[in-house]
Amino acid sequence: MPKGTALPPPERPVADETADALPSKARAIMAEVTATLSSDALEGRAPSTAIEPKVLDAIITRFKAAGLQPGNHGEWLQEVPTVEITATDPTPMAVTGKGTSQTFGYGDGYVAASYRVVPETRIADSELVFVGYGINAPELGWNDYAGIDMKGKTAVILVNDPDYAAQTEDGLFKGRRMTYYGRWTYKFEEAARQGADAALIVHDTFPAAYGWNVVNSSWTGAQYYVQTPDDGASATKANGWIQKAVAETLLKSAGQDLSALSEAARRPGFKPVPLGLKVRFGFDNTVRKSSSHNVVGVLPGTERPDEYVLYTGHWDHLGHCTPDASGDDICNGAVDNATGIGALTALANANVEAGATARSQVFLAVTLEESGLLGSEYYAANPVFPLDHTVGGVNMDALLPGPRARSFAMVGGDKSDLTALFRAALADEGLGEVPEDHSERGSYYRSDHFSFAKRGVPMFNFERSTDLVEGGRAAGDALSEDYVTNRYHAPSDEYSADWNWDGIVQEVSLFYRLGRDLADSDSWPNWHEDDEFRAVRDKACAASQGGC
């Protein structure tokens, strides 16, 4: 069968239990690594800080102990050149016009940062324009910026995309399932392409998938970017968020209603609405150019060592962040994503012990995920192992403690040939498949597999459902809601010796099986014909020499 064509799921050697099942000691390995990486001693694992070498050393030590080889041409680390920009002395946001003068505080009303490497950022008397969802999608006949020149203006943008409130996944923007047009990263990129001075996204908890506390903790403090040749000059001067209540107040003073405009923005033909208001805010920038690092380990293949299967997870978190009521200002990131690196380490151990596969297996602990997937983006743009020789892989991000689940969901839906392998594994394990929970949250575009997917590399990304063996959906929904509301990106995301690891072990066992199956097969899974990433994979494979 030609390369680029997926084969049926491989026959599995039932008698070979070593290669077939995740070793029992994986649980202890994951607990040890998670506890170490999320300890106060590592201060929340902020990249490009004095603590980073200690974090890297902890990961490298574990990779060495597992029996991996250094994966970056004999080195463990891949340098990721970064710039750190910290906004200081922010002013209130002042809005004037139509007989009104209002101010909103930094942190409680708005947050903002600059992608530009400049000593200060000043937005002065910039006209506010409501641009709906801030989408320009010619292939869909949709342009929220139609007919307006945004030069010198500030875009006010709704979060998510126009279909997010749908009950199904039918619609121009895939209904309830978020598309990339709904991601905040896209909205800032498009505002810059339109020439806007600044972009302010209206925060709303349901379509954003997190509360204002997450926005506040993520955007106040050091922001990291990969260095660019123009030092960020092609970006807007400032990007940020405003509370929904602030947006309602602003629009009311402009004689508009946020609910009515939001409803209009969901329909084709929406045109931007100048508000007749001007905004002013600013801050100084403390700039530090430095570098962070990805950690790369490899287990060379026995038959086709120049074909690669990836295992990825991000090691970074927020470091010191907004203190909680007790004064704790360390965002430890135990679930997000010390668990993922714990799983990555356990998988390395398991695969070494089971013996090398036909293809090489690459274990990649990436940095700067919390800053916009920057570590994986840098690797994917500067791959150690060519992407047209990379078969696919699995990504692990924020594995939630709790009981085993009765079913699993493919994040992003059925997009590629990997789904058939996933379904075969579920059937063998007696597990069901369910639709992804909260597809409106756009999880597919919020983790490191996306950096590879948009360049054509199919990656497994799946999750346990909330239908738990112990307690059913009520218990599962409660666990998920507690984490999102009370722990996500907060100092309370801490490791506990009382964690229930059963569900994580179940999940990682599937990662182990599917990754190893892919690494032992000779199939080259591809995206489905109608998928957004099919064309880029086909183009890469057509030009490949000895790859896909």
Image (cartoon, rainbow, N blue to C red):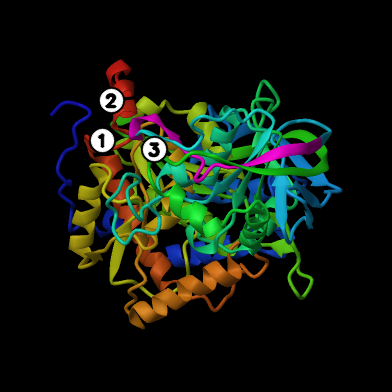
Q: Which quarter of the rendered picture does the C terminus lie within?
A: top left
The quarter of the displayed image where residue 487 is located: bottom right
In contact (CB < 8 Å): disc 3 and disc 1: no
Are the residues at dot 2 and dot 1 in contact (C-beta closer than 8 Å)?
A: yes
Q: Amino acid at mark 1?
A: Asn
Q: Residue at x 73, y 48 (%)?
A: 98
Q: Secondary structure at mark 3?
A: helix
**From the viewer's perspective, is 393 left or right of 339?**
left
Residue toward you, 94 or 313: 94
> Can you identify the residue that label 1 sits on?
526
Q: Magenta segment range?
A: 121-140
Q: Under tag 2, what secondary structure?
A: helix
Q: Residues within 10 Å of mark 2 (few under 14, many from 20)?
A: some
Give how far apart the Cα atoms at labels 3 and 2 are: 13 Å
Q: Is residue 295 visible?
A: no
Distance CA(mark 2)–CA(mark 1): 8 Å
For marks 3 and 1 on the same chain, the one whose residue lies earlier in the sequence? 3
Image x and y of residue 522, in percent: 22, 35
Q: Could you tell me the amino acid type at mark 3?
A: Ala
Quarter-wise, where is residue 405 in the image? bottom left
Q: Residue at position x 17%, y 46% from top? A: 10
Q: Is residue 113 visible?
A: yes
Q: Earlier in the sequence, mark 3 or mark 2?
A: 3
